[in-house]
Image: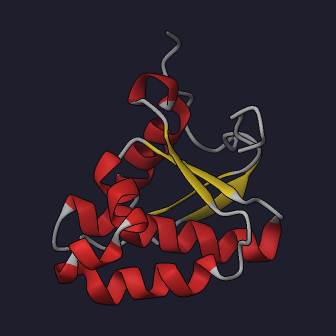
């Protein structure tokens, strides 16, 4: 996201099922951070998951996620101005659409870009 909160790059990947939805959120943030190191100077990430934000801000309070959060903390070193903000689902429709659509693919799928690729169905218009 840029300084105005607009998405500059978006990405999705269909991860194998994790222990919980929160594990999937952490895995997705890790993947996004690793990819932004390669593709962008992005420092700001958005999520509709308030628990993920709490985990990143206070990882010691989430001991059951210690291994996953340790990797996030290591990656944060590469982002001197790292910021993660809450984006309400109503304002996060494109990301929500990408996540739901990607889950329906049976083959591995990775996507990083500035807009939804033409080979994905279009999200419903609101």
Q: Determine whether 102 is above or below 38 in the image.
A: above
Please name the residue shown 44% across and 53% down the image: 102
Q: Determine whether 117 is above or below 38 in the image.
A: above
Count numbered badges in the picture: 0
Residue 8 vs residue 99: left or right?
A: right
Please name the residue shown 50% across and 81% down the image: 73
Out of 1 and 14, give the one closest to the viewer: 1
Residue 98 vs residue 4: left or right?
A: left
Please name the residue shown 82% across and 64% down the image: 40
Q: Residue 107 appears at what percent x and percent y?
A: 44, 69
Q: Quadrant of residue 94?
A: top right
Q: Determine whether 60 is above or below 107 in the image.
A: below
How is the protein colored in the picture?
A: secondary structure
Out of 55 and 14, give the one closest to the viewer: 55
Q: Residue 103 appears at what percent x and percent y?
A: 36, 55
Q: Residue 56 appears at what percent x and percent y?
A: 42, 66
**In the rendered image, is residue 13 in sight?**
yes
Out of 124 and 59, give the one closest to the viewer: 59
Q: Determine whether 4 is above or below 120 in the image.
A: above
Residue lying farthest to the top in this orientation: 126
**In the rendered image, is residue 106 in sight?**
no
Q: Quadrant of residue 23?
A: bottom left
Q: Residue 76 appears at what percent x and percent y?
A: 60, 76
Which corner quadrant holds the N terminus? top right
Q: Quadrant of residue 74?
A: bottom right
Please name the residue shown 60% across and 82% down the image: 75
């Amino acid at each position: 996201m840029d300084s105005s909160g607009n998405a500059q790059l978006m990405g999705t990947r269909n991860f194998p099922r994790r222990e919980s939805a929160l594990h999937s959120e952490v895995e997705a943030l890790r993947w996004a951070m690793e990819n932004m190191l390669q593709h962008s100077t992005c420092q700001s990430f958005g999520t509709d998951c308030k628990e993920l934000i709490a985990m990143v801000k206070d990882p010691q309070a989430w001991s059951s996620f210690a291994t996953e959060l340790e990797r996030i903390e290591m990656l944060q070193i590469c982002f001197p101005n790292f910021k993660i903000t809450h984006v309400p689902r109503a304002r996060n429709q494109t990301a929500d659409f990408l996540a739901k659509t990607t889950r329906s693919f049976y083959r591995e799928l990775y996507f990083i870009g500035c807009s939804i690729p033409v080979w994905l169905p279009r999200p419903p218009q609101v």
